[in-house]
Amino acid sequence: MSYIVEGAYGQDWQGSNWVFRHMSEHLLRVLQKTEGAEELAERLEEAVDIEIGYLDISDLLQSPKLSHLWSQAIEETIALLRSEGNADWREPDRFESFLTKVGELKSLAEIQQPTAA
């Protein structure tokens, strides 16, 4: 089963439930302590709590400020995950691909330039 996260301007991220669950517990802590990221934290917490396999933050990530906070939080989450390492992982060889997948969440915040008509 997979999880879908909707970002700004029609961008989305799709990952396995285990990737989302493991990443989200760390990302949620980061967002909760980040000043100005309360809406992002609330939306993520709600998605984690109700386990519907879908998180829509597209409206929030259209804000340059929240997009910046999201990108920073993803970077901080990756650093946190990397510091914890993969020693407790059942399949440690999947750790780097997991971090890569988490890093892809940053693309949800990238502001796309309008196309010329």
Image (spheres, rainbow, N blue to C red):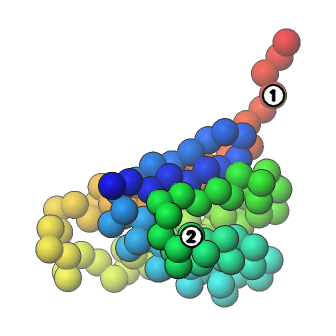
Q: Secondary structure at mark 2?
A: helix
The answer to the question of whether label 2 and label 1 lie on touching residues, with beta carbons closer than 8 A, is: no
The image shows residue 84, relative to residue 4, as above or below, that is below
Residue 42 at what x, y percent from top left?
68, 77
Residue 79 at what x, y percent from top left?
46, 73
| Amino acid under disc 2 | Ala
Looking at the image, how many numbered discs can be counted on the residues? 2
- For residue 44, what is the image quadrant? bottom right
Could you tell whether 110 is left or right of 18 in the image?
Answer: right
Could you tell whether 57 is left or right of 93 in the image?
Answer: right
Spatial CA distance of label 2 from label 1 is 30 Å
Q: Any mark on residue 62, and which?
A: none
**Mark 2 residue crowding within 10 angstroms, few (<14) / some (14–19) / many (20+):** some
Question: Where's the N terminus, which quadrant?
Answer: bottom left
Residue 38 at what x, y percent from top left?
75, 79
Q: Secondary structure at mark 1?
A: loop
Q: Residue furthest top?
A: 117
* Nearest to the observer: residue 70 or residue 19: 19
Question: Which mark is nearer the camera, 2 or 1?
Answer: 2
Q: What residue appears at the point 62 percent right and 41 percent down from the top-left corner?
A: 11
Question: Where's the C terminus, which quadrant?
Answer: top right
Kindly identify which residue carries mark 2. 47
Could you tell whether 57 is left or right of 13 in the image?
Answer: right
Residue 30 at what x, y percent from top left?
59, 80
Kindly identify which residue carries mark 1. 114
| Amino acid under disc 1 | Pro
The image shows residue 90, relative to residue 9, as above or below, that is below
Q: What residue appears at the point 41 percent right and 71 percent down from the top-left corner?
A: 21
Point out the tag, 2 or 1, that comes first from the N-terminus: 2
* Nearest to the observer: residue 21 or residue 77: 21
Residue 100 visible in the snapshot: no
